[in-house]
Structure formats: structure tokens, C-alpha cells
Image: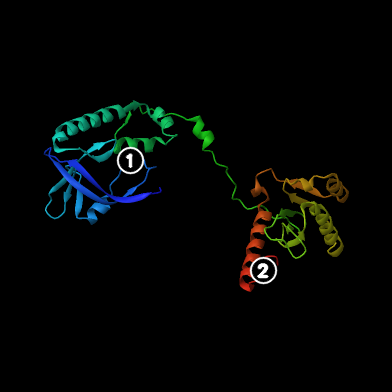
Amino acid sequence: MKAIGVRSVELTVAQTDQSAHTIILTKVYHCPDFFTNVVSLSVLRGKGAFFDGLHNTINFVKDRAEIAYTLCINGLNTFILVDNPAEVPFAMALATARSHLYEKGMLAKATIETWHKRLQHLPPAQIHLLARSMKGIIVTEDKPFHCEDCYLGKAKKQISKRPQRRSNRIFKKVHVNVVGPLKHKGLHGEKYWVLFTDNRTRFRWIYCISNRGSAASTLKQFVCIIKTQIGITIGCFQLDGAAEWFSKDITDFFKDEGILTEVSTPYTAHQNGIAEKANHLVEERVRVMLIETQLPPKL
């Protein structure tokens, strides 16, 4: 809230005995966008005054002398302001009548289900708490109900925490994920990396590439290296639903090599959780090494 000015304000306020008293408030901030005028109780205490909630008055701390009478209107204790002392009785009567009209108008009766919908689908226990702690809410009927909108709107995705089963041999299943685009390019313009994780050993291989279109050729290269250097044919790739894994070229390659594929459901990264966890570990360790060595991010 922006204040456009600060000044002192002189007010003539009513007291309990229907007399008037002039007070001066200093350092009053003028905020045109604020919906009402407020006085800080902490500032009053700092000036040697306090609010007496039992009698709704502002009093001096030193001698308990009354400064002003306040009336609860719209839920707020409010000064009754007048232009001259002769207006005090009429002003107090009018303010009291308005406060009673407000309280009567604000009292509303409805069933617990109706209040539930009025209060943005608040739980019944919290509605009862509100009804006990404030005026304006009366629950007429407290029958149990079922809100289908709450079931649909507040539903949360349940993710299994059960660890995935490990393969009984190496390279029976390999998890693949493409990460990027990265915030900083590599020395040769790399913006992505392809991460391969063996399901059995959790051993990882990382290949940096300049665009996602190179991911398919990188996978072919990885298959050839494993077959040539280790003499094992990969049995299955766990992939996400990225478009690079569904081109005719790569699908024909999988058929020719006899490699099965398992594709995660869209927007369910936890189905390929091993690859996601591997990404997190790699990023974390690279970040730590860059911080330790104070090398530039492109490395």
C-alpha cells in the first residue's frame, strides 16, 4: 500500500458520557487506495494509551482517563466523530442504530452443505469453528453430505513409492532420458545430453548433443558400442514419450536389433524414475564440481 503523504490530523471524538474530546494524531499516512481509516494500537501504546476492550474505550495508561469511546461497526471498533460537542448524543444514537442493523443483516442461516459451498468448499469442521468464533454464521442443519466437486477438484495423483525391480542381468533393460535445453551451451555448442542408465548396475553413460534430433543417432551409437566392446545386445529401452523415439528410422532400428521398448505415459515422469533420479544426481554433482573449481558454467 503506497502512502502519498504524512501529516497530523485533529479529530473531535465522542466519549462515553456523551461529551466531546479533541485529539491530535501525528504522523498519519495518507493512502488513497486503502478502504478505511485505521489507528494502530501498538502506536497508541507507545504514546501512553491503551484500548479497553471491556468498555470499548481508549484510555490513558497513567491515570486511566478516557480519551475516546469506540463502537463496534462492521466488526471494527470505530471512533464516533463530530464537528462540535452538541452533535455527540445524536451521533452516538445514529452509530448505535447502524451497528445493530449491520449485525442483524449479517446474521445468516443455512445448512452445513450450503455454508460449505459459500465458503469455497471449506471442510465442515472449520465451518463449525468459524461459527463459534464469529458472528454471522448460523448452521441450521448438520447432516453429513458428500461433495462430488471436492472429490474431483481436490484429488491428488498417487505415486507409488515401491522401488522398481532390478533386472537379473546387465543390459537387460536400459533407461534413457534426454535433458535440455541447458541454460549454458557447452564448448562445442552442446545444449542437451542423453543419459543411459543400466537397470541392473545403475551404471551411467552421458553423451552431450547440440539438438534433440541427434538423440536417435546417439542411441544407435550406444547400442553398437555395447555390442562391440562388451558383446551384449541390449534387451529393452525404457523411454519417455518424446517425439525423437517414434521416427520410422529408430523404430525400424529397434525391430532389426530385436530390442523391445517400454514408453512412459505422458506427464508421468515417475514411471521412468530411475532415469529421472540419475539426471538429478548428475546435475547435482556437476554443479558441486563447478562451484568447487570456480570454472565457467559452459564447462
Residue furthest out toward the right: 256
Q: Amino acid at mark 1?
A: Thr
- Compared with 144, 15 (above or below) is below
Residue at disc 2, secondary structure: loop
Asked if residue 69 is positioned above or below residue 193 in the image, the reply reads: above
Q: Residue at x 85, y 59 (%)?
A: 224
Q: Looking at the picture, tell me which residue is in the foreground, 69 or 106.
A: 69
In the image, taking residue 62 as reference, residue 208 lies left or right, namely: right
Question: In this orientation, which residue lies closer to the viewer: 138 or 164?
Answer: 138
Asked if residue 234 can be seen in this view, the reply is no
Amino acid type shown at disc 2: Pro
Quadrant of the rendered image containing residue 155: top right
Image quarter of residue 248: top right
Give coordinates of residue 286: x percent, y percent: 66, 66
Disc assigned to residue 36? 1
**Residue 20 occupies quadrant:** top left
Residue 186, position as x, y percentages in the image: 73, 63
Q: Residue furthest bottom?
A: 293
The answer to whether residue 59 is seen in the rendering is yes
Name the spot of residue 188 as percent of width and height, x first.
78, 64
**Nearest the eye: 8 or 147:** 8
Relative depth, front residue between 292 and 173: 292
Of circles 2 and 1, the one toward us is: 1
Q: Residues within 10 Å of mark 2 (few under 14, many from 20)?
A: few
The residue where tag 2 is placed is: 296
Residue neighbourhood size for the residue with mark 1, other residues' Cα within 10 Å, grouped as few (<14), some (14–19), many (≥20): few
From the viewer's perspective, tell me whether residue 51 is left or right of residue 197: left
Residue 212 rendering spot, x and y as whole percentages = 77, 52
Q: Earlier in the sequence, mark 2 or mark 1?
A: 1
Q: Residue at x 51, y 31 (%)?
A: 149
For residue 37, side relative to residue 58 (left or right): right
